[in-house]
Amino acid sequence: MDKDFTEEMLGIIPFIRRYYNNKYDKVKKIESNITSQQIQVIKELYYNNYKLSQRQIEKKINIRRSSVSSLIKTMIKNNLVEKDINENDARGKMITLTEHGIEIYEEILKESLNIDEEVFRGIEKKEIDIFYKVLGKAKENIIESIGEDIKINIDIKSK
């Protein structure tokens, strides 16, 4: 790799992050006090039949038990999730996405599609597929470089 490529990547990544963050401010208008970690929890619940144990959430979003506990308390207070007894483990708790949480995530999905349409406008599907493939390989290289015991919370999916 040459120096120009590295400089370009270091410039474009923060630019893309700022662009997406600005676009997600529309979501903040729907639910003004939602955080990115709360969105991660909602996403995991949404794609896991609206229910996960607290321990599963810890593992999926890679944060400590105490952090998950306070995060869940805040989310309960904001009517995003509910906490129930885990039928499979009396010591554990099941976290369930509320109807309000589902509505919030569906708004996020809708906004994500709008953002993707803007970002990828004029780019052929074949080119987007190659882009995702390259990102996936780069992610694998980064994981290999820093060690597999460190989890990276980036989902790169083939489109």
Image (cartoon, rainbow, N blue to C red):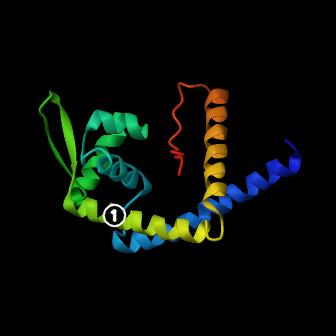
Disc 1 target residue: 106
Point out residue 96 in the picture as x, y percentages from the top left corner. Answer: 21, 48
Viewer-side residue, 128 vs 116:
128
Point out residue 26 in the picture as x, y percentages from the top left corner. Answer: 44, 73
Q: Quadrant of the N terminus?
A: top right
Is the residue 86 above or below the residue 46 in the image? above
Toward which corner of the image does residue 74 lie, by quadrant? bottom left
Which element carries disc 1, helix, strand or loop? helix
From the viewer's perspective, tell me whether residue 66 is left or right of residue 116: left
Point out residue 51 in the picture as x, y percentages from the top left corner. Answer: 23, 44
> Callout 1, which amino acid?
Glu
Residue at image coords 65%, 51% = 131
Is the residue 2 above or below the residue 88 in the image? below
Residue at image coords 61%, 31% = 143
Point out residue 2 in the picture as x, y percentages from the top left corner. Answer: 88, 44
Residue at image coords 54%, 30% = 150
Viewer-side residue, 138 vs 62:
138
From the viewer's perspective, tell me whether residue 130 is left or right of residue 57: right
Residue at image coords 27%, 54% = 75
Toward which corner of the image does residue 103 lie, by quadrant? bottom left
Q: Residues within 10 Å of mark 1 (few under 14, many from 20)?
A: some
Q: How many marks?
A: 1
Viewer-side residue, 146 vs 43:
43
